[in-house]
Amino acid sequence: MKELDWANLSFGYMPTDYNVRCYYRNGSWGEVEVCSDEYLKMHMAATCLHYGQEAFEGLKAYRGVDGKVRVFRMKDNAERLQRTCRGILMPEFPVEKFEEMVKKVVRLNQEYIPTYESGATLYIRPLLIGTGPQVGVRPATEYAFIIFVTPVGPYFKGGFHSNPYIIMREFDRSAPLGTGTYKVGGNYAASLKANSIAHERGYASEFYLDAKEKKYIDECGAANFFGIKDNTYITPKSTSILPSITNKSLMQLAEDLGMTVEQRPVGEEELATFEEAGACGTAAVISPISYIDDSETGKRYSFGDTPGPWSTKLYNKLRGIQYGTEPDVHGWTTVVIE
């Protein structure tokens, strides 16, 4: 294992020894290749550079107290990538080959997997890009699929604690019938300015209402939102937000814990009724929300300065499954290193 200060890693890029690649040429995917080069050489007219033919995923590998290394729900990530490919006309990458490449890249870089409960994990980034040249707006004929890994610390400094958010009506992250439900880079580029302004104002992240009517909750920055009241887990249903694998998992765990789960449109005014609220995603798992300020009306929705009881239970349950200290009754984890 590498001699790194695991407990103080940032959520940033650190070079590791290997990445894995696979290329689509002449109508089919080739063999998996192992590479130690961090750079890509591509045509200057590649469609990923001009027309946004780019999709990615994010998942993690966890070193458990038993020494085993587990990856969480990688089949779900593979299937979500396929859905994105269908949405922006890229060739679907086979689920079995996706899983093979995840296992291979984790094993090749196992010296970079952080120690158990250091607060750090090995972040896995699959990336599929159009590399074939086009000047007209049309799909490429060649593609590259790459997976690299990097050890990361908590997404929010301090880990599992409550953070403030701000509603910013002057920005939209994605359109109702656009690419919001796909994991493409353009959605994240659209959030950079709002996110920067939120940070400048002292908030953890920006908070979006729906782009069409500005009445319903959409997302917390790049994460899904959930609210809790009356033993009910409520999360927005929308045609412009990414279906989070973490949120999907939390909905199942909420049911397992005896909660009612509702996925439906959530009006902004309902924020005032929630006992707890949070953002969820692969990077942070759960980021409890302390309060949400409405920058236009001056209204503040408060949920407490510390994580609530349900958020804490759900966080501990999910983390326990990921690290192997809780029973994986749904078969979500794959042991990649014994």
Image (spheres, rainbow, N blue to C red):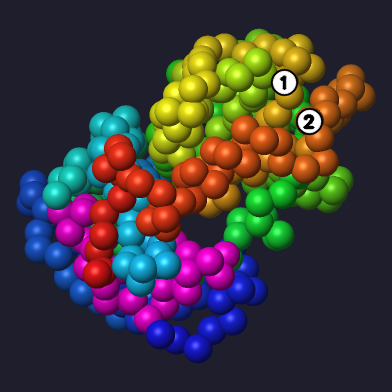
Span of residues in magenta? 97-123
Residue 16 image-quadrant placement: bottom left
Q: Is residue 119 visible?
A: yes
Q: Is residue 333 left or right of residue 181?
A: left
Q: Is residue 23 magenta?
A: no
- SS at badge 2: loop
Q: Nearer the viewer, residue 198 or 301?
A: 301
Rendered position, 146 above or below 283: below
Neighbours of disc 1 within 10 Å: few (<14), some (14-19), many (20+) = some
Percent position of residue 243, x then y: 43, 30
Q: Is residue 23 visible?
A: no
Quarter holding the C terminus is bottom left
Residue that carries the numbered disc 2 in the rendered image: 303
**Residue for point 56% across, 44% down:** 315
Instruction: Using the image, tell me which numbered label, if any, was put on residue 65.
Output: none
Residue that carries the numbered disc 1 in the rendered image: 274
Neighbours of disc 2 within 10 Å: few (<14), some (14-19), many (20+) = many
Percent position of residue 245, x then y: 41, 38
In space, the residues marked 2 and 1 are separated at their CA atoms by 7 Å
CB under 8 Å between callouts 2 and 1?
Answer: yes
Three-letter amino acid code at the position of disc 1: Phe
**Residue for point 65% across, 15% down:** 230
Mark 2 and mark 1 lie on one chain; the one further toward the N terminus is 1
Rendered position, 322 above or below 288: below
**Residue for point 40% across, 85% down:** 1
Q: Nearer the viewer, residue 238 or 23?
A: 238
Q: Nearer the viewer, residue 234 or 133?
A: 234
- SS at badge 1: loop
Q: Is residue 103 magenta?
A: yes
**Residue for point 25% across, 63% down:** 336
Three-letter amino acid code at the position of disc 2: Phe
